[in-house]
Image: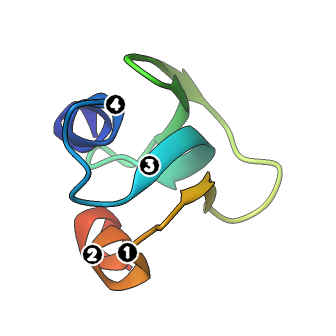
Amino acid sequence: MEQILKALSDSESKEYGVILRAKGMVPSTDGGWIYFDLTPDEYELRDGQPDVTGKLCVIGSGLDEAKLKNLFHV
């Protein structure tokens, strides 16, 4: 997850579009859940339990939805 967020928070790279904000919760490989929050050039990860099944939201302009889906494996 950290590699994904590093790729999205790199404001110099426009590979996925201009990312203004991303947040969500995704399952971790150990059976738990990872919450994430991202703004340009910074992000935060924390453990938690989901209220609902995993979800994510990416806000920005010129987003490449196919590349984002591939990045998040959805």
Query: Disc 3 marks which amino acid?
Result: Val
Foreground tag (3 vs 4): 3
Marks 2,1: beta carbons within 8 A: yes
Left of 5 or right of it: where is 25? right
Cα–Cα gap, marks 4 and 1: 15 Å
- Where does label 3 land, which residue? 18
Asked where in the image residue 16 lies, by quadrant, the reply is: bottom left
Give how far apart the Cα atoms at labels 2 and 3 are.
13 Å
**Label of residue 64 in the image:** 1
Q: Nearer the viewer, mark 2 or mark 1?
A: 1
Give the residue drawn at x 79%, y 60%: 52
The amino acid pointed to by label 1 is Asp
Callout 2: SS = helix
Distance Cα–Cα, label 2 vs label 1: 5 Å
Q: Residues within 10 Å of mark 3 (few under 14, many from 20)?
A: many
Q: Do the residues labelled 3 and 4 touch (CB within 8 Å)?
A: no
Q: Could you say which quadrant of the image residue 53 lies in? A: bottom right
Residue ID for mark 4: 9
- The local secondary structure at tag 4 comes to helix
Q: In this view, does 54 lie above or below 42?
A: below
The type of residue carrying mark 4 is Ser
Q: Which residue is drawn at 35% across and 69% down?
A: 68
